Image (cartoon, helix red, strand yellow):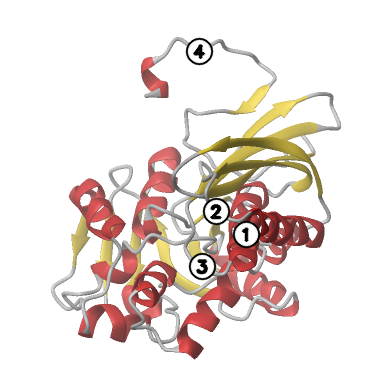
Amino acid sequence: MLSQLRLAADPALLVGISTSDDAAVYRLSDEIALVQTVDFFPPVVDDPYTYGLVSAANSLSDIYATGARPLTALNIVAFPDDLSKDILRDILQGGADKTEEAGALIVGGHTIVDAEPKYGLAVTGVVHPGQQLTNAGARPGDALVLTKPLGSGIITTASKIEKAEAHVFDEAVRHMTTLNRAGSEASVSVGVNACTDVTGFGLLGHLRGMLQASKTSARLSFSQAPIMTGAWELTAEQGHSPSGTQRNRTYFDSSVTWAPQVHSEAYRILYDPQTSGGLLISVEAGKVQTLIQELGQRGVESAAIVGEVTDGKPGRITVVE
């Protein structure tokens, strides 16, 4: 929709909507650029406090995907007038605690009455102009690294009908509430070529966005993709998937070639809409082991090399076993 609008141009806008990046970057001076993003969604877990944690981590992730440091955040709230305000308080406390963990401040926000609760943050950060990470710098020969396992959409969907075991759900929550700060800091330290976070469009959707912006293609290995405990069994064997999986498949699959050896149900993982998913990083092959080491030293336990960037039609992805 934004592409259909007449939008003003400004040379100080370093990153805008043209590459579908995670956040906008606006140069204020030679030393400081402002980074802005916004995200909110309905509950993906039942516990209000945990919902606040997850939603805040998800909102902050777009700042981390640019290599920036978050400074302030505004609450965005939709809440029914027939639910206890204690629930809203717990949601906001979860958001405040996760924002504090990120070293940022809640400085206000806006609330409306709505039939369904929704919560998220508008976040502002800073980065040195020219040092921001974008999704448009992936180069042929780069390795693709994913910092969190896939499957949160599958597990949270199954949990709503009590089909996910407690330890499976708890692990998913742990991943969803983990900030992408360590992945961002490692990426900046090593000097990667491109970065985005994996959220609602799934791994394949966000990879396609990176490849289109970078005018490259990629080869992705399904067997190398990290998967949350229990997610494969829940989806491939029991058929649990969120509705967004099929929407993603319908929208993106024309850009994907599936090798014959790939499991027929692999799409359920690779198109699974993630909440507060990991960073997808494109890094020179000669730096990839250094990046993996840096991630490990910062406590990123699930980082994996999942593919490589190639020459070819922009946005094309070949999925191999």
Task: Compare marks 1 and 3 and give the one earlier in the sequence.
Answer: 1
Which labelled disc corresponds to residue 146? 3
Residue type of the residue flagged with mark 3: Leu
Query: Mark 4 = which residue?
Result: 7
Labels 3 and 2 touching (C-beta < 8 A): no
Task: Compare marks 2 and 4 and give the one earlier in the sequence.
Answer: 4
**Mark 4 vs mark 1, CA separation in Å:** 39 Å
Query: Mark 1 = which residue?
Result: 87
Q: Nearer the viewer, residue 234 or 317?
A: 234
- Residue 59, compared with residue 308, is above or below; it is above
Residue type of the residue flagged with mark 1: Ile
Residue 249 sits in which quadrant? bottom left
Position of residue 235 in the picture relative to residue 114 (left or right):
left
Q: Secondary structure at mark 3?
A: strand
Q: Residue 33 at x, y = what percent?
A: 77, 32
Q: Nearer the viewer, mark 1 or mark 3?
A: 1
**10 Å neighbourhood of mark 4: few (<14), some, or many (≥20)?**
few
**Mark 3 vs mark 2, CA separation in Å:** 39 Å
Residue type of the residue flagged with mark 4: Leu
Labels 4 and 3 touching (C-beta < 8 A): no
Q: Is residue 126 visible?
A: no
Q: Nearer the viewer, mark 2 or mark 1?
A: 2
Position of residue 137 in the picture relative to residue 123 (left or right):
left
Image point (33%, 42%), residue name: 314
Residue pushed farthest left? Answer: 260
Image point (22%, 57%), residue name: 246
Q: Secondary structure at mark 1?
A: helix
**Mark 2 vs mark 4, CA separation in Å:** 40 Å
Which labelled disc corresponds to residue 83? 2
Q: Nearer the viewer, mark 2 or mark 4?
A: 2
Q: Nearer the viewer, residue 79 or 58?
A: 79
**Mark 1 vs mark 3, CA separation in Å:** 34 Å
